[in-house]
Image (cartoon, grey):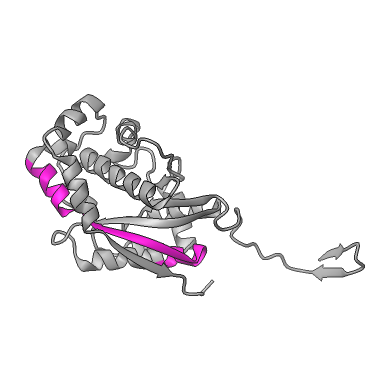
Amino acid sequence: MNVDIRQNGRTYISDEVVLAQGGLPKGTGGKALLLLSGGIDSPVAGYLMAKRGLNLEALHFYSYPYTSEKAKEKVLSLAKKLANYVDSIKVHAISFTKVQESIHMNCSPEFMITIMRRIMMRIAEKICKRDGLGAIITGESLGQVASQTMQSIIVTNEVVESLPMFRPCIGMDKEDIVKIAKKIDTFETSIQPYEDCCTVFLPKNPVIKPSATKVQKEESFLNIEDLITDCLAGEEIIEIKKDNLL
């Protein structure tokens, strides 16, 4: 039992404390762009940064015809669940098929993931600068996959020129991430068996400790600026509103 006696003469009595989400008020930290895949980690990363007062927009890459329409619908469902915590989310949906085909045809296969991630980050930064977003958010967890080793993260960061990269899941075990995903009701959607673009043209032995010099050499076989321009020309923007369930 709690008794709260105020100076204005009022007294409040309560016998139960109901915890809210915690964190900071919505939007007090500015706005950032979440790289939203169809996996477990990125929705959790978005939720954790929203708790720190960030409004969110999301960037999703898809690879028709290698991935299905269901994969995109899955991501929009995840965005809907996140929108419940931030009122609305603008999703930037971008076809990544030509980029992946170009990397596959022109670069050594073991560098596929690294180069792909670097181009994604370049696109994310361009969208942030164009639309006034202050940071990029990813769901990376250190050492979880080949693109999330310390060396891979350093090489990926290299192409982001002027924005902070927020990785709130970086030191979390998978079990910790799953626990939060279940709490915010994204887990069951995330495990639906619809693959995202990161599963396309996966190499048998991806490099896990890439050097910037070798990656830059591989990228020299691509016309990266033209690929990025094509991606942005086909950008689709989808506004997702909260469903007022919370």
Which residues are drawn in magenta?
A: 80-105
How far across and how far down the image is residue 96, in percent?
A: 20, 53
* Rendered view: 206 above or below 12: above
Residue 219 appears in the rendering: yes
Residue under the point 29% across and 68% down: 73
Residue drawn at (17%, 46%), measured in percent from left and top? 227
- Secondary structure that dominates the magenta span: helix
**Figure check: 196 above or below 189:** above
Residue at screen point 21% across, 67% down: 69
Q: Quadrant of residue 40?
A: bottom left
Q: Nearer the viewer, residue 180 or 114?
A: 114
Is 83 a magenta residue? yes
Q: Decide which of 229, 138 is in the foreground and name it.
A: 229
Q: Is residue 144 left or right of residue 166?
A: left
Furthest-left residue in view? 105
- In the current view of this chain or complex, which residue is farthest to the front? 130
- Residue 76 on image: x %, y %: 34, 66
Q: Quadrant of residue 4?
A: bottom right
Measured as percent of width and height from the top left, residue 1 is found at 81, 66
Which x, y percent locates residue 183?
49, 62
